[in-house]
Image (cartoon, rainbow, N blue to C red):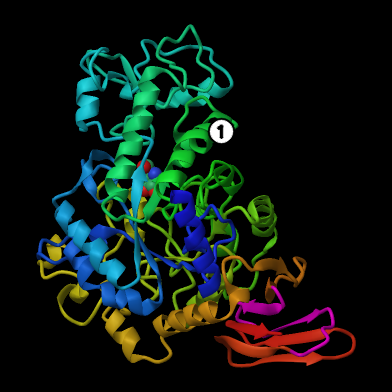
Amino acid sequence: MKKAVCLIIMLANCIVGLSAQNPEQPSWLGDAVFYQIYPSSYQDSDGNGIGDIPGIISRLDYIKSIGVTAIWLNPVYVSGWTDGGYDVIDFYRVDKRFGTNSDLMELIRQAHSRGIKVVMDLVAGHSSDQCEWFLQSKEAPDLRYSDYYIWPSFKPEGVTGAGASLLSKFVATDAPRGPFYIKNFYDTQPALNFGFADPDPEHPWEQAVDAPGPMAMRRELKNIISFWMDKGVDGFRVDMAASLVKNDPDKSATIKLWKDDLMKWFGKEYPEGVLIAEWFNPEQSIEAGFDLDFFCHDGRYNYSTLFFYGRRGFGPNATTTIPYFDEAGAGSLKEWYDLYTYQYDAVKGKGYVCMPTGNHDFNRVCTEGRTNPEDLKVAMTFFLTMPGVPFIYYGDEIGLKQNPAAPSTDGSGFRAGCRIPMLWNATANAGFSTASVDKIYIPQDPDPNRMTVEKAEADPNSLLHYVRAMLRLRKEVPALGADASWKLVSSLEQPYPMVYERKQGNERCYVVLNPSAKAVTVTLPSESTKPVLIGGNYKKCTYRQTGKGDVISISPVSAAIYKF
Ligand code: NOJ
């Protein structure tokens, strides 16, 4: 029956033009545009200085007006708040700071009535150390939740290979089950037990992936997923999805667990639900069955060479390399291009590689030298014309500025700088909250000239209006969509301007990007017809057919989109 319903939905989608490159993906995904909301920072409705769910509901018309079709909420579960909500105490309940489960249901109802999907964050790999499962598990080995966590009885010495990196996750404890437990991220985030890839018989805490404890853990995870999916949620972004099976360096056991069990089950139960990986290696995560993965800020597959002066733009590893999207015009595309094309080719036709405008873990796009709307329009043209599903981090649509001085809040560390409250209007606290300034979640940009939604609405040249126009264009022109092919047509040796081709069927576009402060020219192979300029932000852009190649010249800090 379910299969028949699926088939009907798929056929109907073909007729109305909805797309997803792979029939196993939700039919709405190919046309989706996500808006990520860090709930503590979006809109406060009760005057305590922290954003909440009723606040988000009150902004749904604005969210819809941007042109996005789905929301991803960072965790809203009851939390110990040592890691921005990623230390979950109760996976089945909304934290009081945000409201109630009923408030969340109301958000889903109201979002759906506007045609907007709602995706939650699923913290699959760990809980809070205050979670009742952990509190029980640390007491004794034979209780209901005892095996939800991993309790090494000693710290092995001289370990090499896979096991060596896990040693840094051993946390000393005086709990009765001690002397150690294994964490996933902070000490307050004990790892949930999905087993070990290759259990060492000398290490009795290393259970097999299919041992009773890890199997019970999987059932619990499915329960959490069902609990929310059955209430109308449209899917999850899965936090640290690659972390589940321990001592699994090539991730084959983790991929198998997702692919052979969780994904099969999810696909059957919720064929229109989406699962988004936080894995940062699409080649692996799409193989595991995820619909999409990010190419952004972590591990090897990051875009720091495009946007930041160093890895993620801060910290001891930051270098002074000039990023590509910078007026200096001294960046390179090569490192990003090699990694991106590797991932893109690996998953083409099976899933999406997505490049978000930002997120809650790394610098905003509006940072360092790139804080004026014209620079940001070039960057946004890139984000919104690449293949895969666009993700707009709240506030990036108005150029919300990174605040490097923001104090660490809820365990954010340096990440507070990108989790700053939204700026809405000219009232107190920019309309974010009626609380006194000292109660505001993270201090807002004190600049009296700061951009707000209200100002952006009033200015026809604002970044906000540009983002809307780009999203309209993306919707109207299938060659700019998620599934259209992508190919760099300019040369890596002469990176400014970057020109890439997007193609779907007979429709073809060129996207021309010049983030530099100089006018630039590029010669490309001769085309049989001259394309038409259909969008962008430029003072001047010309396309000449010379007989010795087609020549595009574009003004400084400009972006243009041509259609053949
Ligand atoms: C990735 C999340 O994006 C980040 O905010 C969090 O601190 C870690 N996972 C741990 O859950």
User: In the image, is residue 476 part of the stretch drawn in magenta?
Assistant: no
In the shown orientation, is residue 373 left or right of residue 332? left
Q: Is residue 502 above or below residue 151?
A: below
Q: Residue at x 31, y 73 (%)?
A: 114
Residue 523 falls inside the magenta stretch: yes
* Quadrant observed for ligand 1 in the rendered image: top left
Considering every residue shown, the one lying at the far right of the view is 548
Dot 1 lies on which element?
loop
Q: How many callouts does the rendering have?
A: 1
Does residue 561 appear to the left or right of 15 in the view shown? right
Residue 441 in view (yes/no): no
From the top left corner, tell me how far across and down residue 376 is, in percent.
48, 76
- 551 above or below 66? below
Asked if residue 293 is positioned above or below residue 127 in the image, the reply reads below
Give residue 173's position: percent from left, percent from top: 27, 19
- The span picked out in magenta is 505-530
Q: Which amino acid is tagged 1?
A: Lys
Residue underneath mark 1: 251
Which residue appears at 32% of the width and 73% of the height? 63
Residue drawn at x 44%, y 39% is: 265
Query: Which sits in the foreground, 377 or 414?
Result: 377
Q: In this view, does 433 lie above or below 334?
A: below
- Where does the image place residue 73, in percent across and percent down from the top left? 32, 57
Other residues around mark 1 within 10 Å, as few (<14) / some (14–19) / many (≥20): some
Residue 513 point in image, percent of width and height: 63, 77
Considering depth in this image, is 94 or 231 the residue closer to the camera?
A: 231
Quarter of the rendering containing residue 351: bottom right
Q: Nearer the viewer, residue 508 or 499?
A: 508
Q: Quadrant of the C terminus?
A: bottom right
Q: Can residue 110 be seen in this view?
A: yes
